[in-house]
């Protein structure tokens, strides 16, 4: 399935990105509550699942706050205009969310979230640092001030598309050079394409680095 994750702490669940398979991912992984959504960027494979949060609106009886930068939020507003118009609908007929610009540190429950700016070729996207975890998916360059924010990590989740270069994504080699600089305790690569065979690929990675898989759970 496409790449997303849930970060849980003391009953709070934060979803990073809403893939087109969000509904299936939530069912499969028994996700029963969403307290906030962090969006890395507004490409289809990261936001097209937003309609599925309707079910959480009914269960939780609340709007779900979405956080991202203002450009991403504008795209969400366009794509999901039906959800944000003022037409009165019965509860659950459309997703209910609020759009919030994230610029600095954000606190949700006991989780402290720092946005980390990165480049997806010519587009500025966001990664997120949550305590000792950082999550950066579709990225082709991490500026030096963002690299500073990624020091002393227990777990780095980083996009690595394939072995051959790609203009918008880190290749495995480029992602490994970021790992070499940041030296996190553990790294999981995500957003791989079909060029990477999971088991043989994992054998070729250095110690502490693995390709992630659907349903992977990490405790920090
Ligand atoms: Zn993507
Ligand atoms: Zn993308």
Image (tube, grey):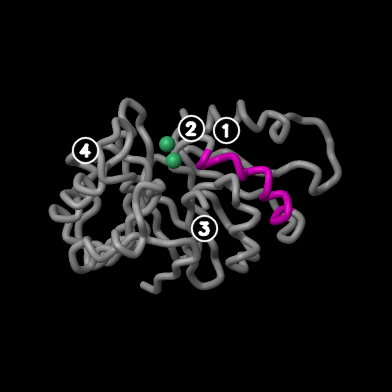
In contact (CB < 8 Å): disc 2 and disc 1: yes
SS at circle 2: helix
- Residue ranking furthest to the left: 181
Read off the residue under disc 1: 76
Q: Earlier in the sequence, mark 2 or mark 4?
A: 2
- Does the magenta-highlighted stretch encompass residue 125? no
Question: Which numbered circle lies on residue 72?
Answer: 2
Point 63% across, 63% down: residue: 33
Callout 2–callout 4 Cβ contact below 8 Å: no
Q: Position of residue 55 (x, y in %)?
A: 73, 54
Q: Which residue is mark 4?
A: 143
Residue 52 shown left or right of residue 134 in the figure: right
Segment colored magenta: 45-57
- Figure check: 49 above or below 33: above
Residue that numbered label 3 is attached to:
14
Q: Secondary structure at mark 3?
A: strand
Question: Which quadrant, please, contains the C terminus?
Answer: bottom left
Q: Earlier in the sequence, mark 2 or mark 3?
A: 3
């Amino acid at each position: 399935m496409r790449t997303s994750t849930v970060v849980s702490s003391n009953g709070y669940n934060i979803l990073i990105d809403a893939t087109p398979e969000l509904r299936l991912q939530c069912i499969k992984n028994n996700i029963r509550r969403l307290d906030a959504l962090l969006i890395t960027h507004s490409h289809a494979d990261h936001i097209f699942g937003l309609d599925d949060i309707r079910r959480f609106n009914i269960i939780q009886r609340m709007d779900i706050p979405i956080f991202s930068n203002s450009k991403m939020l504008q795209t969400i507003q366009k794509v999901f205009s039906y959800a944000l118009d003022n037409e009165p609908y019965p509860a659950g007929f459309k997703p209910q969310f609020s759009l919030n610009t994230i610029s600095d540190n954000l606190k949700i429950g006991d989780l402290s979230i720092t946005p980390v700016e990165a480049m997806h070729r010519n587009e500025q996207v966001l990664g997120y640092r949550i305590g000792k975890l950082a999550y950066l998916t579709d990225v082709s360059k991490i500026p030096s001030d963002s690299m500073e924010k990624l020091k002393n990590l227990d777990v780095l989740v980083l996009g690595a598309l394939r072995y051959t270069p790609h203009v918008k994504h880190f290749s495995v080699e480029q992602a490994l050079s970021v790992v070499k600089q940041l030296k996190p305790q553990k790294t999981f690569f995500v957003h791989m394409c079909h060029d990477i065979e999971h088991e043989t690929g994992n054998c070729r990675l250095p110690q502490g680095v693995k390709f992630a898989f659907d349903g992977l759970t990490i405790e920090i």
